[in-house]
Amino acid sequence: MALVQRISGLHQRGATHESAAIVRQVAVMITPDDVARLATLLQENGPTGSSTYLARSVSAGAPEHAAATLAVLRRDGMIDEAADLFHTLWSASSAALPALLAALEQSGQSADGQTLLWERASAPAEELAELAQHLKAAGRTDDVRHLLRQAAGRPINEVAAIAGALNEETAMELVGELVRLRSASDIGRFGAAIQGATELYDTLLFAADDLEESRARSVFAALRTGGLPTQPAPRPRSRSRQRR
């Protein structure tokens, strides 16, 4: 209670920055249960909005602490505080997201992790490529697959930009998702968008060639209709692969 009085006193005297700094510091130092108890006290006796500010400030700490606090706030029926914390977690950096996803899983909140991942699938190409790299480095291959599957459904020009930003291995996975999910005409438009990137275009041809026969024929017909090549570019024998 003394802490709440100090926070309120500073706020009333106009020292709002100092008051907020105390809340931010405390948020990452106390246990999740203590965060919930302090939030309750701030709801009742603190400055307006201080309980939700406390909850948002938890996101600056360790992912495990943030995930555990989110679970406790929900358990205790602190709906606004939990919602504010979760929405703040949407802005977690690409480097921090794999650990946050793991922490959410460990605290029984896997669905929230998938929501965060779904949101990131609409990120700009470079940001999405960076996230895919961090997820792979953390061994979260299923998350990479889900991310790329969502990305493959974006407008074709955006998918082409993403493919160009990814490393070779991950770009191959994205192209694989694209040829399985999109129409032959969409794949043709994708081919036109990436034609200048020889390695990537050849990846598209090989992915299309691995499709079921009738679907592969439709894709290659769409490529031909667009005046695009249906054979890989010539290259040294050691790196070549002929279409079947």
Image (tube, helix red, strand yellow):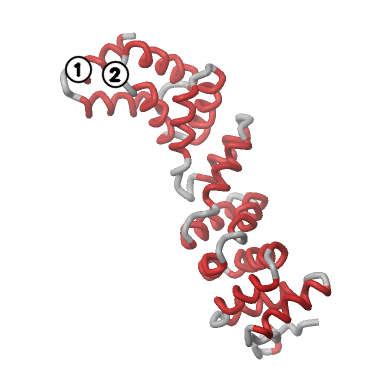
Residue at x 30%, y 9% (from the top left corner): 2
Helix, strand or loop for disc 1:
helix
- Sort mark 2 into few (<14), some (14-19) or many (20+) by Cα contacts within 10 Å: some
Residue 176 position within the rendered picture, expressed as x and y whole percent measured from the top left:
69, 66
Q: Position of residue 92 (x, y in %)?
A: 45, 43
Front in this rendered view, residue 161 or 225: 225
Asked if one can make out residue 27 in the rendered structure from this viewpoint, the answer is yes
Q: Residue at x 34, y 23 (%)?
A: 49
Image check: 176 left or right of 124?
right
Identify residue for label 2. Answer: 47
What kind of element bears circle 2?
A: loop
- Residue found 48% across the figure and 50% down from its top: 94
Q: Is residue 128 left or right of residue 150?
A: left
Which residue is denoted by mark 1 in the rendering? 12
Rendered location of residue 16, percent (x, y): 22, 26
| Quarter of the view holding residue 221 | bottom right
- Kindly check if marks 1 and 2 are in contact, taking CB atoms under 8 A apart as contact: yes
189 versus 110 height, above or below: below
Q: Is residue 238 visible?
A: no
Give the camera-side residue of 114 and 213.
213
Q: What residue occupies the far top of the structure in this picture?
A: 1
Residue depicted at 52% across the width and 32% down the height: 64
Distance Cα–Cα, label 1 vs label 2: 8 Å
Q: What percent of the width, then of the height, locates residue 104? A: 58, 35
Earlier along the polypeptide chain: callout 1 or callout 2?
1
Q: Quadrant of the C terminus?
A: bottom right
